[in-house]
């Protein structure tokens, strides 16, 4: 059996969903929550992109077209940016477009761009859990704490067609219903803490 670190082609593809409208954060649509800065002066988008790109080099971030500032932040964070008109239809459509762009991957780790506190080590642990020799092609994995599932969520290669069929604003939640999920136990809040309102930034 071959030993040593996994090469990039052995890893799931990282997908960062950054195409939402963030209406709960700003109903008027004047401020993009992903462009708000955290105490270190870096944006939410940059932090989320840096985490995923560090955990899974070659990760892509999906955005709606016409957002050059957001694209720049995600790119500087290390992600390849996919600007996709389909993403305007919602999270499901954005995820399907990203999976299509990485259709030959060994699986997909789906992260949300409004969760900037996710630790790199946890993202990578979730990703690696679906490519172990013991993992099946139908594997699904996610962080877990106190009976609650967090993010990101990893899907094995057998889920490709189901992910490609997603559309509209229905993300991958429906695929998880009634499925066995490999639980990556964690005490870190970053797997459960997102930004929905301005108060969540602090």
Image: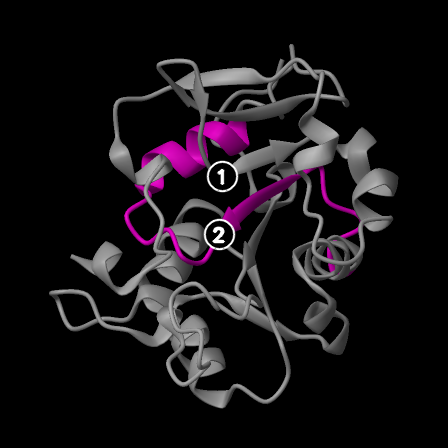
Q: Residue at x 62, y 77 (%)?
A: 64
- Up the image or down, 75 lies above or below 156; here it is below
**Label 2 crowding class (10 Å Cα cut-off): few <14, some 14-19, many 20+?**
many
How many numbered marks, from 0 up? Answer: 2
What's the CA distance linking mark 2 and mark 1? 7 Å
User: Where does residue 187 sit, x and y in percent of width and height?
Assistant: 26, 22
Q: Secondary structure at mark 1?
A: loop
Crowding near pointer 1: few (<14 within 10 Å), some, many (20+)?
Answer: many
Q: Quarter holding the N terminus? A: top right
- Residue 152, numbered circle: 1
| Labels 2 and 1: the sequence-earlier one | 2
Q: Residue at x 19, y 65 (%)?
A: 38
Task: Residue 140: say if magenta.
Answer: no
The residue where tag 2 is placed is 112
Q: Which residue is at a point 26% across and 34% down the rendered structure image?
A: 189
- Local SS, label 2: strand
Asked whether the viewer can see residue 108, the reply is yes
Task: Left or right? Give the position of 189 relative to 182.
Answer: left
Q: Residue furthest top?
A: 134
Residues marked 2 and 1 touching at CB (< 8 Å): yes
Q: Can I make out residue 59 in this image?
A: no
Q: Residue 90 sits in which quadrant? A: bottom right
Q: Nearer the viewer, residue 121 or 171?
A: 171
Residue 30, given in percent of the width and then of the height, sits at: 40, 85
Tell me the magenta residue range.
101-128
* Image side of residue 65 versus residue 115, left or right: right
- Left or right: residue 106 compared with residue 132: right
């Amino acid at each position: 059996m071959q030993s040593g670190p996994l090469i990039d082609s052995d890893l799931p593809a990282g997908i960062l969903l950054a195409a939402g409208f963030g209406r709960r954060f700003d109903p008027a649509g004047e401020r993009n929550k992903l462009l708000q800065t955290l105490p270190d002066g870096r944006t939410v988008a940059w932090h989320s992109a840096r985490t995923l790109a560090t955990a899974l080099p070659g990760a892509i971030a999906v955005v709606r077209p016409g957002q050059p500032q957001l694209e720049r932040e995600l790119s500087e964070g290390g992600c390849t940016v996919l600007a996709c008109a389909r993403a305007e239809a919602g999270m499901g459509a954005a995820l399907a477009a990203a999976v299509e762009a990485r259709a030959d991957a060994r699986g997909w780790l789906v992260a949300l761009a409004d969760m900037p506190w996710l630790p790199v080590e946890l993202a990578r642990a979730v990703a690696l859990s679906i490519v172990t020799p013991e993992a099946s092609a139908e594997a699904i994995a996610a962080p877990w704490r106190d009976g609650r599932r967090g993010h990101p969520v990893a899907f094995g290669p057998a889920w490709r067609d189901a992910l490609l069929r997603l559309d509209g604003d229905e993300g991958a939640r429906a695929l998880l219903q009634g499925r066995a999920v490999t639980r990556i136990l964690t005490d870190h809040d970053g797997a459960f803490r997102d930004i929905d309102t301005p108060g969540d930034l602090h």
